[in-house]
Amino acid sequence: MDTFVQQLINGLNIGAIYALIALGYTMVYGILRLINFAHGDVYMVGAFAGYYIALNLGLSAGPSLFGLFIVLVGSMMIAAIVGMVIERFAYRPVRKYSRMTTLIMAIGVSLLIENLFVARIGAAPRAFPDFLGSQSQQPIQLFGNAAISKAQIIIFMVSIALMLVLQYIVFKTKVGTAMRAVSFNLNSAKLMGINTDAIISLTFAIGSALAAAAGVLTAQYNPNIDPLMGILTGLKAFVAAVLGGIGNIPGAVLGGLLIGAAETLVVGYGAHVGIASTYRDAVAFAILILVLLLRPSGLLGSTVQEKV
Amino acid sequence: MPTFIKRILALVVAVVVLVALNAYMSRGGLFGFGVPYYYVEIINLTGISIILAVSLNLITGFTGQFSIGHAGFMAVGAYSSVFLTVYYSESAEQWLTGIVGATLAQSLVFLVVILFGALVAAVAGLVVGIPSLRLRGDYLAIVTLGFAEIIRIIILNIDAVGGATGFRGRVPPWDGRLLIPAYANFIWIGGFAIITIVVVHNIVKSDIGRALISIREDELAAEAMGVNTTRYKVLAFVISSAFAGIAGALFGHFRQFLHTNDFQFIRSIEIIIMIVLGGMGSIAGSVLGAIVITILPETLRKLPGDLYSYRLVIYSALLILIMLTRPQGVMGAREFGLSWLKRAQKRPEGDKPIDEKGVPIAQQTTVEKPKEI
């Protein structure tokens, strides 16, 4: 039982990270019907932005919550700009073309970011500064042998806070209403006087900022960051978004948490039912396939009637 | 000239050219002329890319079903065929050598091995295709991606094919060949590339092809016209997978080393880039795309000094640039053939290619779908 609780805590922690990234996928898909393959790389850029901010401000000296806050906000701002630049110069010019073209464009941007980072700083992992001292501090004991580390608590708190902020922006503000209108129908929204280009740009900024937050938070958990860290994490986060019903914000969070938990549980308990822990990376995809075959629009997605 | 004789002639020419090129690229060279092994490798890998791109074009370009899992089927073909070679081919080859001689025995065994790879990949295509082809668009794409990743991870966990260390030959305690034999050469690879092009071309021009294209243009309308869309989609998927399996088998016996890292998600993406670059729905475009995408990164290796480390950056920047300037691909939906030269003179409407009735092809095939409301 203790180990189960422990696995669940670890799993939900990874899941919270996936959820933060999945939100960016789902928001962009909801508005542009575009699988933004470069989103995983924005997550990587966010982690590196945090790394360089900490390095240049000398924040890596000691563990401090204030340092983490500065790094988190700074990297979110940088990633938001990166996201807006990507949208403006890569996606907007091809928006009118077929879905395949925009998809290849997304892949091209993703490859460009990865290769640029590899060429500039090399593929070797860097050590992200440990702001929470989680490597040295004892984790907090819950009941029995289950424990939760300080980094995990912070990850939970920050992700929940960011999700609440997003929820507020999307459902309570004027900009959020415009975002929902654009995702409902881009052309009608334009006719209603909404500046759709600005709204799309903003959506990329918000999604990228969330991904950057995920990047910095992951680095508190696993301090090795490298230019290719976004590929698999990005894919799994996208799977999480599809799992919850793509275009659906609560769905992305649900999908992320489910995939994180399932992954950790397979590593912990798979051996008992004959699934080796090396199947960890296949779990997300297996769940996705099952869900899509039984419920093609995802867990919380609504079925769209096809028009002739 | 009767068509039959024409075809025989074409076959003879193709075989002669393949044999001559293969001799040219062999260690001894042809009449004292040869090419360095580095180029031989690139040319052969280009041939394999052509098989992959043209076969993917059948399902993605002509049927309009977006698949990002082609590398998975390639992996299935590669691993199953090499498995057969390593563990079962030796005795078969010895037995056949006694009857038909060493060279022919080797060729026959390799042919069986390739067909086995194609068969296993086709079965995998059927298993993946039947459930997933109910889905459409991005959902289909992501499910094929998922299946390809699962296939890769399953292979990674099979000890008999080397698992994470890669597959070079027999894995103790199993008994078999020490190394994967270098069966594949340019005759095989080039030959199968030609076969792939001819088969896909003939499928597209046949009534099956019309059904496939009708599914691409409007699935609902095709169904209403009595096209059994599920059946045709699965058929195209299975054929496409089988050719990916062949490409995998050739790849395995050419490289003589297999690792699951060669069949990652990025590999499938590379194949998609080939067909999009060349122009979806154009076989000639796929061939062109395969050649460019395979050779370009190697050419960029020749960049001087500092630029060398930026070759992959330049590669991806070029990709973005091409998408910005010519999103329909280099060839669009056009084909390249001998008829190009003939047709050029009697085109009534500028340089637009036309069909037999004089209707511009561009107007028929690139129907812009209205945005979903």
Image (spheres, rainbow, N blue to C red):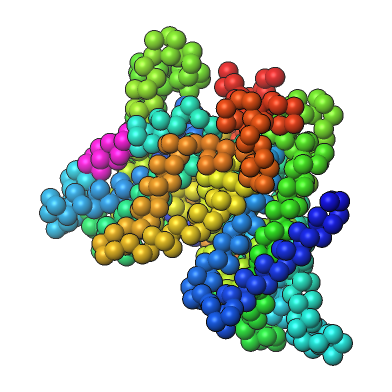
Query: In the image, what residue occupies the spot 49% across and 36% down?
Result: B327
B246, above or below B211, in the image: below
> Measured from the top left, where is residue B313 in percent x and y?
35, 53
Residue A81 on the magenta span: yes
Determine whether A207 is above or below B31 in the image.
Answer: above
Relative image position of residue B64 (x, y in whole percent):
66, 38
Locate the C terminus of chain A and report the quarter of the image it occupies. Answer: top right
For the stretch drawn in magenta, the main secondary structure is helix
> Image point 45% across, 57% down: which residue?
B296
- The answer to whether A52 appears left or right of B234 in the picture is left
Q: Is residue B247 left or right of residue B95?
A: left
Residue B314 place in picture, x, y as percent: 36, 52
- In the drawing, does residue B314 fall left or right of residue B373? left
Residue at image point 69% right, 58% down = B194
The quarter holding residue B223 reads top right
Q: Does A155 appear in magenta?
A: no
Q: Is residue B282 above or below residue B14?
A: above
Q: Residue at x 75, y 27 (%)?
A: B357
What segment is highlighted magenta in the picture? Answer: A73-85
Q: How many marks?
A: 0
Residue A267 visible in the snapshot = yes
Judging depth in this view, the residue of B271 and B75 nearest the camera is B271
Instruction: Establish if B368 lies above or below B123.
Output: above
